[in-house]
Image (cartoon, rainbow, N blue to C red):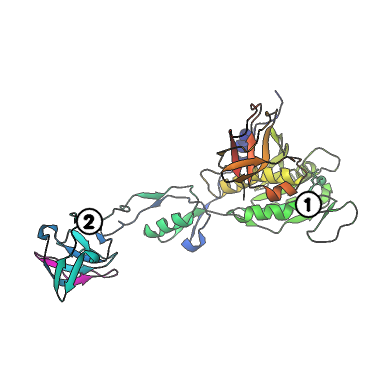
Amino acid sequence: MSGLLPVEDAQARLLALRAPLAPENIAFSESLGRYLSEPVVAQRDQPAAPLSAMDGYAVRFADMPGPWTITGESAAGSTPSATVGQGEALRIFTGAWLPDGADTVIMQEDLSAEGTALHLTTHDDIRSGQHIRALASDFATGATLVAAGARLTPGAIAAAIMSGSEQLAVGKRPRVAILTTGDELVHPGHPLAPGQIPDSNGTMLAAMLAAEPAEVSLPLHLRDDRSSLSHVLKDLERRHDVIVTVGGASVGDHDHVRGALEDAGGNIDFWKIAMRPGKPLIAGTIGDALLLGLPGNPSSAFVTATLFLIPLVRHLAGARDPLPEVRQAPLTSALAAGTKRRDYLRARLEKGALAVFDGQDSGRTYPLAEANALVIRDIGAAPRAAGEAADYIAIA
Ligand code: AMP
Ligand code: MG
């Protein structure tokens, strides 16, 4: 036993700390990327009547092969001007209601019309009932179109609008504060004195959250000072659902997140997770807020945010499946055996194959710029040859 917590256990413990936030009703136009609190259930039949799928003429199949007399028309947006009796045809357009009496639509390309006289010009088969969208063939009243907990994609929004609902019930967006810690850190783009480095993690985390249903405050930076950290945590807790700190999460003399949380009255858990990068992670609660303490190395911060912060935000926002999707693709080169910790290797997926980068030092930022995938190498995994499949998580 290594005494390290498996990733899945840590994820489950983190998500169990708080239930999803209360739902709210929002307009369709605001709903992209939100998670449904209730399923979208059809309030109407779609289509609400049989429709024509073509521009042409509505006839009775029994009258084949014509000729017919044109007695009216049916266009989208209104109801047919007449019913169709024996030997009669109605001009009809795509999306228009099929007139009573008609059971078949013939495409205009297969007919010739002179005044009100209509003749068949094709030798192709005309099938009974052709080119008609049946009543409720898209969906019927009562059908579940989008499940509770699903993310609202553009397509899901279209289905929700068609359902006849007036608005959508979705989980509230968690309010997230980002706090970077470290005496060496300087605001992005500012000049550096010896020993200083730019604070990349704060803005990186905000960017990772930008695609998520979260209300993210501007990242704050604090020096490695336990008492100011503790004061700021107490203040942030009142206005946020999640406080994510980055850096200072380990057990060094300058790592104050744990101590500051205790001073601020938080309920702390410190996990050493069986993963690389990103072994130390702090999780806990402070007042009504959740606290997630990520390690400061850029790759560690990125990977732990992918595996813990993003899922936490999605869970609070009402996601049914908040964890990143694991996919498979073949490797472009051999991969050594796994160790006692699960690796999340920065890699590039190109033309369907995964190239794992050579330099996997968690302190490096450059591979993050190149990576679009994290290859998962499990604890004790057997070595893989080039061409063998590996698990990976797609990253933006
Ligand atoms: P820490 O987790 O505070 O021990 O930091 C680990 C490493 O990550 C150190 O080399 C830090 O300088 C670096 N680091 C910490 N926070 C940041 C940050 N916000 N941006 C860039 N690098 C950081
Ligand atoms: Mg530090």
- Residue 218 figure quarter: bottom right
Identify the element where label 2 is drawn: loop
Quadrant (top left, top right, bottom left, bottom right) of the N terminus: top right
Residue occupied by mark 1: 231
Q: Where residue 23 sits: x, y (%)?
A: 51, 53
Amino acid type, callout 1: His
Q: Where residue 66 sits: x, y (%)?
A: 11, 64
Q: Main secondary structure of the magenta part?
A: loop
Boundaries of the magenta span: 72-88
Q: Is residue 93 left or right of residue 187?
A: left
Around disc 1, counting alpha carbons within 10 Å, would you say few (fewer than 14), some (14 to 19), or many (20 or more)? some
Q: Is residue 31 left or right of residue 107?
A: right
Identify the element where label 1 is drawn: helix
Q: Is residue 33 left or right of residue 360?
A: left
Image vertical order of residue 284 relative to residue 157, above or below: above
At x 68% / y 58%, what residue is drawn? 217
Residue occupied by mark 2: 130
